[in-house]
Structures are given as C-alpha cells and as structure tokens.
Amino acid sequence: MQVPPIVSLDTPLAPLTSWRIGGAAQYLVRPRNESDLVEAIEWARHNHLPVSPLGRGTNVLVSDGGVSGLVVLISDGPKQLQIERDSGTIRADAATPLPRIAVEAVAHSISGLETFVGIPGTVGGAVAMNAGTGGRSGPSISDVLVDCRVYDLSDGQIRTVSAAELRFGYRYSVVRHRPWIVLSATFRGSPDADTKALQASQKRILRRRRDTQPLRARTAGSVVLQPLDAQPAGWYLEQSGLKGYRLGGAEFSRRHANWIENTADAKASDVLALIQLAEKIVEERFGLSLEREVQLLPKDDR
C-alpha cells in the first residue's frame, strides 16, 4: 500500500510538544476526522508499523532520535462536545482540550469536572493516564468517566469500554498497556450545581497554578508521581538539592522542583539524565523509588 496523502514523512515533533524537544516522526498523520485516523492506522497495520498517539504534547518526552512508525496527532482531530444538562452527561472527542470540558460543564451548571480546568491535555490523554489534581487524594478522571470508545490496533475494531474495564489507578489506566487509541469519552457530573460558586473555584485553581508553577517556561508538567503515603514529590527533589540543578539546557525549575524547564536548547537526553539523576539521589538519600509521571516516546527509550 502506498503512503496515504494524509500521512507526512519525517516530520519534526519538537514543535508539537510543550517541551519543544525531540526528533522527527517517521510518519505523521493529522486526522481531520475519524475516517482519516482509521485510514492512516489501517495503512500502518498493513505495513506492520508501530502506531503512537500524541495529544497536545504535554506530559511526554520525545526521543532525540525521533519515533519510528506512525505518530497520530490526536489533538488535530475533531473536538465536538455533546452536553445533556439534565443528566449531567458530557460526550467529547479525544482531541477536545480538557480545560474546555471543565469550563463548559460549569457553564451548564454541572459539577464534578471543574477542577480539570488546570490540566492542559486532551480527553484522550486524560483518560489514558487518569489525569487529576491534588495528588493521590484529589479528584481524577475516573471519578466522572462513564465509558470511552477506543480503536483496537490488534484487530482494527472500534469498541466501547466501560470505566470499570479501564482498571483505573493513580495516574493509570489499562489504556497505557493496551494497543488502544481513545477516540471519545463520556463523562457524568452532578447537574443543577451552583454555577457562580464553580466559576469562583476555577478562578482560584488557575490563580494557584500561576502562582506556583512555571507556566511561561517550556515544560511538560510534573515529572514524577506523588509517592504513596509520603511527602509531595517536589519536597524530595528540593531536599536533595535538585531545585535549580541543570544539565545541558534542562533545569529543575526554581519555581517548582518537580518540573523540568527547557531553558535553552535542551535535548531529550538532558531531560532524561536529570530524571535518572533524581531517581538515583532520592533512592540513596531517602530509600524511596520515584515513579515517573512523564511518558517517554518511544516507550522503550529509558
């Protein structure tokens, strides 16, 4: 099969990530609709190429060597929303920015999704990693997800998967280990909420983000997960003397120790070296094994 016209070759991925880091995609598709996505993936499956979804490029570190196979830029896909105010139900395409859903839910007096206004990812990525706020005890996608539609790369089928089948955990769902690409999701909040109170809450959330996180820098969000029954991850990094520590063009943020900034022309290898250094130092000093929140692309690029 010839390369479909919608698929581009050797496309730089750095401009498509919030870190502005990484090599090129061997093949890249920007699906305008579900038909584009299916056509490109079927072509990749026929040619035995690996397929990697990419959302808005947050929470991901793309290898300097790029990504083999087909990269699907989910964020370029359709972003339709369907809201049933009476039932508190929201259906959204995978490319829909999560903050948009949070704002629309509040505008329709639906509570339960308002805290997601500060998470700069897509619905697809949020479902895959069970995105949330406030660490292990805070609200997460699993609290409001009803089901999602996925494309199964193993057999080319599109199926609906219930929230229970996703086996959610802290920043985890089985999507991360299954050959699935999320196409859309259904959420349910509580209807008839106090819109003004929810809007005020969202303003506080966004203000706190601006005050505590390096939002103007080139970053990818939190680097490591909140340890179980322990201090916040940033506390261990700061106590280990890593706040402001720099390798190449990558630096642990002076504003928030659990964020790494691309201060100049950082490479993925600089960021990965910083993460590995942090893992080693925290393990030696506190006997604590840090677990990464940032995802590597390709996945085996340790």
Image (tube, rainbow, N blue to C red):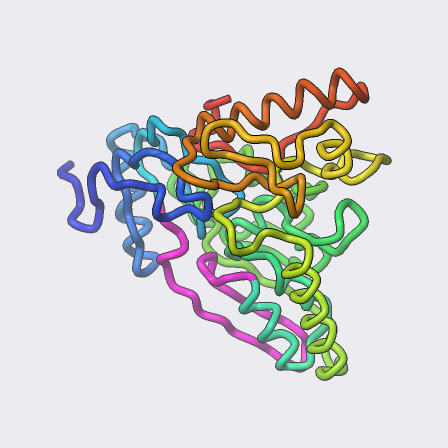
Please identify the residue farthest to the right as the structure is shown: 229
Seen at 58% across and 46% down, the residue is: 221
Is-magenta flag for residue 97?
A: yes
Foreground: 108 or 216?
Answer: 216
Please identify the residue farthest to the top as the structure is shown: 284
Q: Where does residue 272 sit, x and y in percent of width and height?
A: 52, 27
Q: Is residue 170 left or right of residue 247?
A: right
Is-magenta flag for residue 20?
A: no
Q: Where does residue 74 sit, x and y in percent of width and height?
A: 40, 52
Foreground: 147 or 271?
Answer: 271
Q: Where does residue 25 sit, x and y in percent of width and height?
A: 30, 36
Give the residues in magenta: 72-98
Foreground: 220 or 198?
Answer: 220
Tell me where residue 23 sits by quadrant.
Answer: top left
Q: Where does residue 71 sit, x and y in percent of width and height?
A: 34, 40
11 lies above or below 87: above
